[in-house]
Image (cartoon, rainbow, N blue to C red):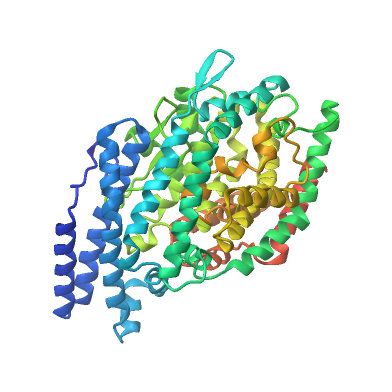
Amino acid sequence: MTTALRFEAISEPTPSQAELGDRYAAIGATLDSGDRAGALDEWDRLRRGYDTWSALVHLHFAQDTADAAARAARDYADTLAPEAADLETGLKRRLLSDPDRIGLAALVGEHALRLWETDVTTFDPAIKPELEEESRLTARYTELLASAKLEIDGQTVNLAGLGPYAEDPDRAVRHRAEQVRWGFFAANGAELDELYDQLVRLRHGMACKLGFATYTPLGYRRLRRVDYGPDDVARYREQVVTHVVPLVARLLEARRAEHGWDRLRFWDEALIDPAGNPRPVGDHDTLVARAQDMFAGMDPRLDAFYGLMNQGGFLDLKNRPGKAGGGFCTSFPTVGVPFIFANFNGTHHDIGVFTHEMGHAFQNWQSREQPGVDYLWPTMEAAEIHSMGLEFLAYPGIGKLVGEAAADRFRRMHLIGALAFLPYGVCVDHFQHEVYANPDASPADRHAMWRRLERIYMPWTDYGDLEFLNKGGRWQAKPHIYGSPFYYIDYTLAQCCAMQFWVRSRRDYQAALEAYVALCGRGGSAPFQDLVSSAGLVSPFADEALSDVVREAAVVLGV
Ligand code: ZN
């Protein structure tokens, strides 16, 4: 690991199925010889190389979805993935069958064994065709959304490019942006319905083949959730209804009254600041430079790491035609330096890249010396604490990115946004629980399910003349619902923890930051609730966790 490392220098040979088979056979032979530690080392090297190769292939495709070679490589990786999973699961089964569990736990950690015990129940060679098909359908969804060419006010933009219009201070512009956005989804509604219908049936079928009654328990296991289940999550959603929904309703009503609108429409929800949402202080190059100043003011470890990412070419942040939507952080476990992908659009969302995605990246970097590849990333609800936590810990220096004059307004906007996200987030989660409990539902049934649930979690929603939304189509714009089932609740659980960091940072900033950095360093070495308590946070499944942060937020926001 060297500070001179450049992204372009990272490469891994494309593995063939035969080579993978040979390498796993060699690891098996090492085990046969009685050298368990040696076999585990070989396997860790293999997985790091494979994961790095797979991450590069998927990243290159996301950087240019129109590149035929990148697509072919992505397709090949998606075809190979079930074969690799087969070999990996076989080895995990063999290791877990060893009667010397204590000796094995001493080598790899008790938590790794729990993860493997979960993993082996999620795979059987019989579901390889379904896994391949699942990747194909998910990739089609990504490609469909990336293909959007939308006309607005004389400009052609993609879905990310609509962002500035959707929160324009001019109400008519915001309305037009939503008409354009949902016009695209309405025009592709039949294919979106068909894709999701196929995905739900495919996943249900996989679950049945593996011996589960529905996809839900399999979905939880695929996310490696070892310390909570659907009942805990359902109770958490109830907490959101009790504590957060009334607060968000009050905030929105205050906004309506302030503007003198007769009703608050859907296209008014994104205009959080009455004077216009604070924007970044400059364009891409300015923000990239200012972020260095912000991190320097926060912590020398964050400062040094950001410099390494930036100088090494590990940031791709500009929006451009053909680039996949969204933002994410991916990692290359052979080298330890992660990569941030995003689509700048000139709104405050660009700032989130430096606070949210950098949180992921920093955790991955801080935990790079964890002993095995299983511990480099935690499960996703814990990973989102690192990202969302850094959003709050960046508050004191956020003026570097939005201008000092707008810093207070930015913090207020961010806090309101964080709270308003929770009802939507749990609605997305509840919807998926209903979808997978009713795998034979028709697309129309699913739209009705969504409509019913959003009235519980977001009773203020008024879609006006946006017919696609009035018919229950909003969920179709959420990639996680297609590609990462049951993932979405993770953001809401993490938000509850991130807001606890915010509360603590208001009392003692340095102590909160140290607890945050230490949590990042623990990576994925423990299950979610253990990581949470190790940082001195209260589990979101405890009743008081959400009510405490909401109480503090209500005082700060004055509602
Ligand atoms: Zn994230």
The relative height of residue 175 versus residue 500 in the rendered view (above or below) is above
Residue 370, by quadrant, is bottom left
Q: Residue at x 71, y 54 (%)?
A: 549
Q: Residue at x 59, y 60 (%)?
A: 433
Residue 418: x, y in percent?
A: 65, 44
Front in this rendered view, residue 177 or 341: 177
In the image, taking residue 40 as reference, residue 380 lies left or right, namely right
Residue 100: x, y in percent?
A: 30, 85
Q: Residue furthest bottom?
A: 99
**Count of numbered labels shown in the rendering:** 0
Q: Residue furthest top?
A: 154
Q: Residue at x 42, y 71 (%)?
A: 118
Residue 332: x, y in percent?
A: 31, 48
Q: Residue at x 72, y 60 (%)?
A: 239
In the image, taking residue 273 as reference, residue 208 lies left or right, namely left
Q: Is residue 498 visible?
A: no
